[in-house]
Amino acid sequence: MRILGIETSCDETSAAIVEGQPNNYKVRFLSNVVTSSLNLHSETGGIIPEIAAREQVKYIIPVIKKALTLYSSSDQAKPESREVNNETMKQLNNETIDAIAVTVGPGLIGSLLVGVETARTLSYVWKKPIIPVNHLIGHIYANFIQRTDDRRQKADVFSPPIFPAIALIVSGGHTDLVLLKNHGAIKWLGGTRDDAAGEAFDKIGRLLNLPYPGGPAIEKEAKMGNPKAHPFPRPMINSKDFDFSFSGLKTAALREIQGVRTYSSSESRAKSRESREVPRDKFSTGSNNKIISNMAASVQQAIIDVLVTKTLKAAQKYKVKSILLGGGVAANQKLRDELQLKIENFKLKIQLSVPPKDLCTDNAAMIATAAFFNYKKVPWQKITANPELYFE
């Protein structure tokens, strides 16, 4: 079965084709095209929904055509030599596509509508079934994709996750822990009460005058910093539930930044903080600044400590065989390394599954894969966008 996936929940516009066989736990990656309006949002320090949706209206059809083009190209022919035009698009679909998968939520309503209405139209015109997909569940299924375009992930070494599994979904607007007993059997364990981890990275990055998005920028700065320089709180790290809260960390970072920016009139306070107190203009340089690097490293470590501790706690409680990471923050290498290290230190017989970094951010391959393993087709007339969609 081959599925065309469409993803437009935020500022990315993506189309992909994946292929899988019944009773097979692997899905092959055939094509995945992603374009983004991130460069426009970087100028404003955050996503402007109207701009994102307008760009997606322009991108959606070219992206779908390119996904079909890349798949249809032979080994000998370059993709551009087999370009899909309007006349051949329907014929090519009938030869290659068995179903259409589309993100229906959560996300920005304008962006979601671009993908949903496109998928509905194609489903009607092509007479193909359509499968609605929860974007958050899609992030989980990035772990089930076999990359045929990646030499490091050959068929004989790719190992799909084993059930039961704990999944940590950590993206810009969500931080959630879920238990997967099997495909389609998902239990939500806990989530963020206020700021998600990705939001904390973005907001603190803005306070540090780092470029948007804040997560990658903080990770880059943190490599040159001391994670113990600032004793930031680890919110809810010892709570008995599996919820998260990062607004307190954001506030603590703000206060620390304000303290660094301000000269103290008290001599004793000046001595105790002399290693951190610098003029505001020096703090605002945004690069090659030890103070910023130390702050970034300390913030990153605080967030990772909470994520790793909560995830391992859930894994041990439910006696799982796998831990899955998903979402944009899952691309953070230190998070990956520390989670693997703790699993080894605790001598846990748990397989850690992390997607390739380019599949951590929003993409249509994960949406198509989620649809393959949770194949529940819905009449195109009943497919609707739901920006508030969560775990059912």
Image (tube, rainbow, N blue to C red):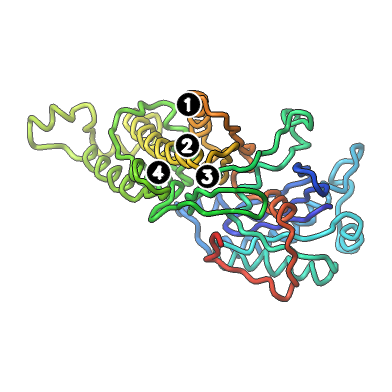
- Residue drawn at the location 63% of the way across and 54% of the way down: 185
Q: For the residue labelled by badge 2, is the local secondary structure a helix, a strand or a loop?
A: helix
**What whole-number distance in Å separates the C-alpha atoms at marks 4 and 1?**
33 Å
Residue 128: x and y in percent read 83, 65
Q: Earlier in the sequence, mark 4 or mark 3?
A: 3
Q: Which residue is mark 2?
A: 312
Q: Residue 3 occupies which quadrant of the picture?
A: bottom right
Q: Position of residue 241 (x, y in %)?
A: 39, 49
| Badge number at residue 168 | 3
User: What's the distance in space between the residues labelled 2 and 4, CA to CA?
Assistant: 27 Å
Question: Crowdedness of circle 3 by 10 Å Cα count: few (<14), some, many (20+)?
Answer: many
Residue shown at 67% from the left, 49% from the top? 366
Q: Secondary structure at mark 4?
A: helix
Q: Nearer the viewer, mark 2 or mark 4?
A: 2
Q: Amino acid at mark 3?
A: Leu
Whether residue 207 is situated above or below residue 272 in the rendered picture: below
Q: Amino acid at mark 4?
A: Gly
**CB atoms of marks 4 and 3 within 8 Å:** no
Number of dots carrying numbers: 4
Q: Quadrant of residue 89?
A: bottom right
First along the sequence among labels 3 and 2: 3
Q: CA distance from mark 3 to mark 2?
A: 10 Å
Residue type beneath disc 1: Phe
| Label disc, if present, on residue 205 of the rendered structure | 4
Residue type beneath disc 2: Leu
